[in-house]
Amino acid sequence: MGRSGLKTTFLVMLPLSLAAGFMIAGIGTAIWPPASAWAAPLVCSGTVDVQSDHYSTPSGGSGVNRHIYCLSGAGKDEVRDEITFPAIGIAGLVYAAIAFVLLQLFAAPRIRRRAEDRMKVSDFGGGISARGLGSPAELQAILGQVAEALQRGQADVNVRTITIGGAGAGSAEGGDSGTRLALLKQLHDSGLIDDHDYKAKKAEILSGL
């Protein structure tokens, strides 16, 4: 699993799983007590007792409170401890683990693919890796990043060879010569190519007219 996969797991999948798990355990217990009562024996060495207390509100409404108790001892020595929240906590963790596995199997691959599709440039420090410099707008955006990096003194760029027009722009012979010359001049004015390369490429473009 790469860095993007770990980020997706810890920043997206894990919080979603925990939220889903405790929501199922909490709301599920209020609706149907066995949703978390099954976990009560894990924290109770005695007898588990589930009770529902119905109540009415002054406005005419009604509701119900669910309680899970652990009974130990007998007769006068009987001890009654409420274990509702521990039981919900254990059940919530189990449900979260199940949700995590399901999300990893079905949701995580889609999220990672969408993240990779949105990534246009990777590892800028080691060199520009782009989908293609097919349009002047894309080239202008990259030139702006390079110029900014040079002004901050954080990059040392020396472009010796360059191809005007990428895979999305068609072949060099079929491109618009005026546009190619304008882009070439922009690269030269930005200091990305030296005079020798500028003159050589300019002559190549003019020779194709």
Image: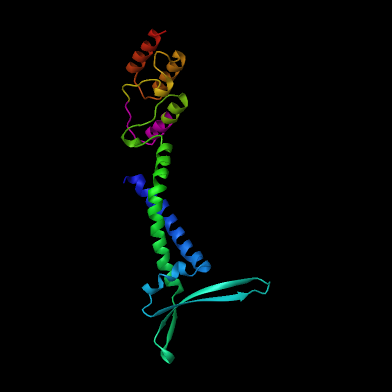
Rendering quarter of residue 77 = bottom left
Q: Residue furthest right?
A: 59
Residue situated furthest bottom in the rendering = 76
**Residue 184's quadrant in the figure?**
top left
Q: Residue at x 42, y 66 (%)?
A: 91
Color scheme of the displayed model:
rainbow
Position of 102 relative to 168 (above/below): below
- Can see residue 154? no
Rendered-image quadrant of the C terminus: top left
Q: Looking at the image, can residue 18 be seen?
A: yes
Q: Position of residue 138 (x, y in %)?
A: 44, 28
Q: Is residue 79 above or below residue 55?
A: below
The span picked out in magenta is: 143-158
x and y percentages locating residue 28 in the rendered image: 49, 65
Task: Compare residues 87 and 156 and report the one nearer the observer.
Answer: 87
Residue sitting at 44 percent across and 75 percent down? 83
Q: Nearer the viewer, residue 24 or 208?
A: 24
Residue 73 lies, with reference to residue 68, above or below; the image says below
| Residue occupying image coordinates x 63% and y 72% | 62
**Image position of 175 with respect to 1: above or below:** above
Along the line of sight, which residue is nearer the eye, 139 or 24? 24
- Whether 171 is among the magenta residues is no
Q: Residue at x 44, y 71 (%)?
A: 37
x and y, in percent, of residue 159 in the image: 33, 25
